[in-house]
Amino acid sequence: METLSGEENYSVRIPNKITIETFKNTDKGIDVTICKDEKDFLNQLDL
Protein backbone atom coordinates (compact mmCIF):
# COMPACT_ATOMS: atom_id res chain seq x y z
CA MET A 1 0.00 0.00 0.00
CA GLU A 2 1.37 3.36 -1.02
CA THR A 3 1.66 6.18 1.49
CA LEU A 4 0.73 9.70 0.40
CA SER A 5 2.77 12.58 1.73
CA GLY A 6 3.19 16.29 1.18
CA GLU A 7 0.75 18.66 -0.52
CA GLU A 8 0.57 16.91 -3.87
CA ASN A 9 -2.72 16.78 -5.74
CA TYR A 10 -4.02 13.59 -7.33
CA SER A 11 -6.57 14.01 -10.09
CA VAL A 12 -8.60 11.07 -11.33
CA ARG A 13 -10.83 10.96 -14.39
CA ILE A 14 -13.47 8.26 -14.33
CA PRO A 15 -14.11 6.78 -17.80
CA ASN A 16 -17.49 7.53 -19.39
CA LYS A 17 -18.32 10.08 -16.70
CA ILE A 18 -17.58 13.77 -16.31
CA THR A 19 -16.46 13.41 -12.72
CA ILE A 20 -13.06 14.73 -11.69
CA GLU A 21 -11.83 13.99 -8.20
CA THR A 22 -8.95 15.76 -6.51
CA PHE A 23 -7.27 14.20 -3.50
CA LYS A 24 -5.29 16.65 -1.39
CA ASN A 25 -3.25 15.24 1.45
CA THR A 26 -3.39 17.39 4.58
CA ASP A 27 -2.29 16.96 8.18
CA LYS A 28 -5.89 16.09 9.04
CA GLY A 29 -6.21 13.49 6.29
CA ILE A 30 -7.04 13.56 2.62
CA ASP A 31 -9.43 16.17 1.21
CA VAL A 32 -11.46 14.85 -1.71
CA THR A 33 -13.00 17.27 -4.18
CA ILE A 34 -15.56 15.91 -6.65
CA CYS A 35 -16.44 18.15 -9.59
CA LYS A 36 -19.17 17.65 -12.16
CA ASP A 37 -17.11 18.86 -15.11
CA GLU A 38 -13.79 20.40 -16.08
CA LYS A 39 -15.06 23.96 -15.70
CA ASP A 40 -16.23 23.23 -12.17
CA PHE A 41 -12.86 21.56 -11.50
CA LEU A 42 -10.94 24.65 -12.65
CA ASN A 43 -13.18 26.92 -10.57
CA GLN A 44 -12.33 24.98 -7.41
CA LEU A 45 -8.56 25.11 -7.94
CA ASP A 46 -6.65 27.71 -5.98
CA LEU A 47 -4.71 29.34 -8.80
Image (tube, rainbow, N blue to C red):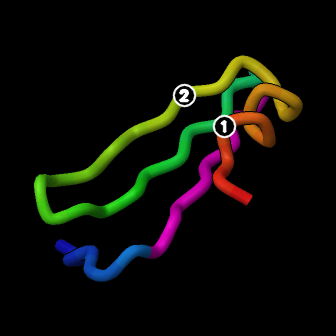
- Image-based side of 13 in relation to 8, left or right: right
| Quadrant occupied by the C terminus | bottom right
* Residue on which disc 2 sits: 34
Residue drawn at 40 percent across, 57 percent down: 24
> Given the current orientation, which residue lies at the most extreme left position?
28
Percent from the top left, x then y, of residue 9? 52, 65
- Image-based side of 1 in relation to 44, left or right: left
Three-letter residue code for mark 1: Gln
Percent from the top left, x then y, of residue 2? 24, 76
Location of residue 11 by image quarter: bottom right
Q: CA distance from mark 2 to mark 1?
A: 10 Å
Graded by Cα atoms within 10 Å as few (under 14), some (14 to 19) or many (20 or more), the crowding at tag 2 reads some
Q: Secondary structure at mark 2?
A: strand
Residue drawn at 25 percent across, 62 percent down: 26
- Disc 2 versus disc 1: nearer the observer: 1
Say whether disc 2 or disc 1 marks the residue closer to the N-terminus.
2
Q: Secondary structure at mark 1?
A: helix
Q: Is residue 35 magenta?
A: no
Q: Is the residue 44 above or below the residue 27 in the image?
A: above
Q: Looking at this view, is 47 or 25 the one in front?
A: 47
Q: Is residue 10 magenta?
A: yes
Q: Is the residue 10 above or below the residue 37 in the image?
A: below
Location of residue 16 by image quarter: top right
Residue stretch rendered in magenta on the structure: 8-16
Residue drawn at 27 percent across, 74 percent down: 4
Q: Looking at this view, is 46 or 35 the one in front?
A: 46
* Residue on which disc 1 sits: 44
- Image-based side of 18 in relation to 32, left or right: right
Percent from the top left, x then y, of residue 19? 68, 26
| Quadrant occupied by the N terminus | bottom left
Three-letter residue code for mark 2: Ile
